[in-house]
Amino acid sequence: MYTQLSRLICLMILFCLIATSSSAQYTSDKTWNFLIEPYLMLPYMNGDTGVGNLPDITVNADPGDIFSHLQMAAMLYGEAYTEDWAIGNDIIYMNLKQDAERGGDIADGSLHAKQFAWEISGFRRLLPWLDVGVGGRINTLSAGARLTIDAPNGVSVRNKSSQATWFDPIIIARIKNPSGDKLLYQFRGDIGGFGVGSDFAWQIQAYVGYRFSQLFQLSGGYRIISMDYSKGSGENRFMYDVNTSGPVIRLGFNL
């Protein structure tokens, strides 16, 4: 698995280098433009996860939990684009923690998850406001659970952690403002996994913003990232069927 993953990462890096090199060839005639967009997400979790032989954990956070846990996600998006084509590169890091719902044998507990994802995508503009594309996303997720189990033979505290890395192919569509507009808007949806990595994965992103100058723009919105992934059994079991969502603020630089 790791050999195949290493080859896949090398191919994706090579693709990035080729795409960047190709884009640079057109920079002199102003055909290609570039967007660098660091952004922050304030995430919370909703779903189920399972680690080893521990009981499945249900997490269900409401918006108030965002501020009580103060978990953050740091991300960076880059895009090279023309009027007809675009190449995107999205890097995501999230450090998440939520309390487990009590029920069954679970008297108390918490889930701590760290996720790193790297997405590369290519788009074709079909209409002034509509792009369609395909891409791939490498996910590395580590999850740890600490549960207080109230069993007939007494109360015990159990800890377990696991990690998984997989690749999801994705299909993307996005609606956005025509190039050159000062008022910015974007609605993007994608689906993926298809059993290659995740059983199924999907995302929705919606943003509005304003381009203040030729260089600088600012936007805000909301993002939902959903993954349904499982592998292994027994002590090696790892299951993650969780929606991660929250408000996002994006700071963009046009080059």
Image (cartoon, grey):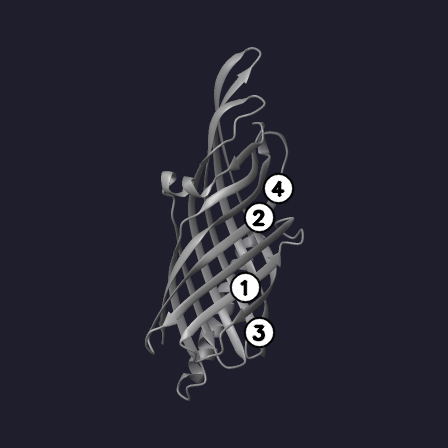
Instruction: Rate crowding at label 4 as few (under 14), some (14 to 19) or many (20 or more) other CA atoms within 10 Å.
Output: some
Give the residue pinned by disc 1: 188
The reply to whether discs 1 and 4 touch (Cβ–Cβ < 8 Å) is: no
| Secondary structure at numbered mark 3 | strand
Give the CA separation, mark 2 to mark 1.
17 Å
Residue 163 locus on image (x, y percent)? 51, 41
Q: Nearer the viewer, residue 206 or 215?
A: 206
Residue 181 locus on image (x, y percent)? 43, 78
The residue at 40%/43% (across/down) is 66
Amino acid type, residue under disc 2 in the picture? Met
| Secondary structure at numbered mark 1 | strand
Q: Nearer the viewer, mark 2 or mark 3?
A: 3
Residue 109 locus on image (x, y percent)? 47, 27
Q: Nearer the viewer, mark 2 or mark 1?
A: 1
Give the CA separation, mark 2 to mark 3.
25 Å
Amino acid type, residue under disc 4 in the picture? Ser
The reply to whether discs 3 and 4 touch (Cβ–Cβ < 8 Å) is: no
Instruction: Rate crowding at label 2 as few (under 14), some (14 to 19) or many (20 or more) other CA atoms within 10 Å.
Output: many
Which labelled disc corresponds to residue 130?
3
User: Is residue 75 shown left or right of residue 199?
Assistant: left
Give the residue pinned by disc 4: 230
Q: Nearer the viewer, mark 2 or mark 4?
A: 2
Amino acid type, residue under disc 1 in the picture? Arg
Instruction: Rate crowding at label 3 as few (under 14), some (14 to 19) or many (20 or more) other CA atoms within 10 Å.
Output: some
- Ranked by sequence position, the earlier of labels 1 and 3 is 3
Q: Nearer the viewer, mark 1 or mark 4?
A: 1
Give the residue pinned by disc 2: 227
Q: How many callouts does the rendering have?
A: 4
